[in-house]
Image: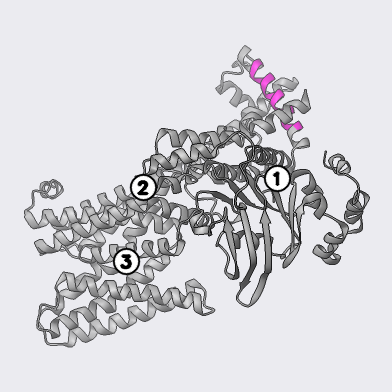
Amino acid sequence: MNLASRQEDFALAARPDGPPASGPAPLEARGLSVSYGVKPALIGVDAAFPSGRMVAVIGPNGAGKSTFLKAALGLAPKIAGEVEIFGEPVDQAYGRFAYVPQRASVDWDFPTQALDVVSMGLYRELGLMGRFRGEHRRRAMAALERVGMADFADRQIGRLSGGQQQRVFLARALAQEADLYLLDEPFAGVDAATERAIVEVLKGLQAEGRTVVCVHHDLATAQEYFDYALLLNLRKIAEGPIREVLTIGNLQRTYGGRLTGPQLAAFGASGGASGGAFGGAGG
Amino acid sequence: MEILLQALTLQLGHNATLATLGAGMFGLAAGASGAFLVLRKRSLVSDAMAHATLPGLALAFLIMAALGGDGRGLAGLMFGSAVSAALGLLAVDWLTRRTRLTEDAAIGAVLASFFGFGVVLMTVIQTLPFGHQAGLESFLIGSTAGMLRADGLTILVGGAGALILTFLLRRPMTLVAFDPEYAAASGVKVRRIDLAMMALAGGIMVVGLKIVGLVLAVAMLILPAAAARFWTDRVERVVWGAGLIGGASGFVGTALSAVAPRLPTGPMVVLTAAAIFFLSMILAPGRGALAVWSARRGFGRKLRLRAGLLALAEGRAPSAEALAALRRAGFASAAGEATEAGRKAAREAAEDESLWARAREILPPEALTGRDDGATPLRAALTPDEWSLVKGASA
């Protein structure tokens, strides 16, 4: 019914001219606590990510990084606290955010091809009755193109490599043309070329004024890829611009004794200095 | 033979026509909605539901008979079966969520208890003095002989309703079947869709009561989807292909049993579907047994040809089997001399091989997993950015 107007909204959402005017935070959590049964997974986390940033959610295994994303989207059993996306509860913000789950949870023999998977990103917009038209196909194709997968459009997903599968799932989120992108370990188990391609796409999203949030576990690349971070270990350890947040003290509090000497030394070497040292390490 | 043709072209009298059309509609709806059940990996749960219909059917019969009516009224029996199927589903759901039982154990427990209870009730019914009880077994394996006009219409309308619901929910059901977490994050209420999917399955079983019977209804949910899966890699085609296969099975099977009334309808319909499944398994291109076999042979040929081309490029003598492959492709003369085309292909193969060697050096092994098969040209295996990476490195 109001499909046409909704599509205009989507077209408007693709604004090329810099970050939007400041409004409600893309993602804000207040006292967010999650528990599976009686086992706490996240305790009283406050966070507010500013618009137009590349945000890393960093912490050791089992610290609740993925849980934070899932709880923010209503996918994990929240027991206390609130989450708002662009100032609204999640169930009123569908369509403004896109989620890229971890790759592992899918049946790879499912009868679906790369382009079909990307088209699923448009199902919400199409609703139950909307017709899938040529323009939708073109948008799905454009999303595949953007992740370098256009040549594989009609490949069954099980016949793609791990990195290619991850690209397809990113393309599915791209097709949604959202303002907030949430990715759960997008670089887990992908090859270096794919990692580079994904980072490039994400930086492109940021350049369009969109906000990107990734669960990230590789401290070595964190400063190179991201400009804002939330450090978690069950509770919030720190949040802020990444250069201010990734300090030895914070990392030790986040990882406890799990960081090795060299890892800490890398941060110690440039702890107080300007970020130039990290650019060299990443290249 | 002539009478079969009459049955298939709907010239066998009014009620037989209605039964055949109803069975076709039932098969269509069962195939299409069953495809989602199979894709969501819920076939076993639907089996538990099918067996759980029996006590409801028997109780509905007893109640209707006690109230002085005809115990065999189709609407009442359908209602009783539906209620009891829903109870079975709830029992499986509750056992899986609230106890430490795994789903398969819960399914086994529910299926056996409900079906056992149903069989006891059926036995009780047979000892009772009403005249009609003999007909009740026909609901176990289906029988369209002597089907009433109203019954035929009920089946037709019920099937059409299930089909429309399947069409409406095709997108959320696809999302949930493929990637429930993503579905939830895009606003689909996964539990509600799952419930709708099971309700559809239950509805289909009840609609199929008269045609294929309780126990075989499950086959009509699963067989068409399993057959259609052989023919395509796309959800939509699996779903509507399954509908087509189910519809054809219902139509043909019922016509067959109309011709030979001593053949029960349910098994005839299911056997037709099974025959289509079997043919699909053998003959389907791509995933069928013959296609897999011939693809394997073709791959062997490609490997031998590649080995021959590389031998030509390096000036070695190709092995006998590689030479045969070269001759067949027109790359070598009968005398074993390389042709013009052969020399060109050999150059290309050698170039591609060195690019592959480069790719194996600079790309991590996981990037090439499943792609490095020794016969695929590198360009066809890589994304454009990986390709330019490799090209750049070897330039």
In this rendering, would A281 be left or right of A193?
Answer: right
Within the image, what quadrant is residue A157 found in?
Answer: top right
Q: Secondary structure at mark 3?
A: helix
Question: Foreground: A119 or A111?
Answer: A119
Question: Which residue matches tag 3?
Answer: B202
Residue B283 lies, in percent from the top left, at 40, 43
Residue B223 lies, with reference to residue B135, above or below; the image says above
Q: Secondary structure at mark 1?
A: helix
Residue that lies at the very extreme toward the top in this rendered image: B340
* Residue B129 visible in the shown view: yes
In this rendering, would A253 be left or right of A147?
Answer: right
Residue A67 lies, in percent from the top left, at 64, 63
Residue appearing at x 66%, y 26% in the figure: B308
Question: Which residue matches tag 2?
Answer: B279
Give the Cα separation between the discs numbered 2 and 1: 38 Å
The dominant secondary structure in magenta is helix
The mark tally for this picture is 3
Is residue B262 in the magenta section?
A: no
Give the Cα separation between the discs numbered 2 and 3: 28 Å
The numbered dot on residue B366 is 1
Give the Cα separation between the discs numbered 1 and 3: 44 Å
Residue A202 lies, in percent from the top left, at 66, 41
Question: Foreground: B339 or B141?
Answer: B141
Residue B249 lies, with reference to residue A80, above or below; the image says above
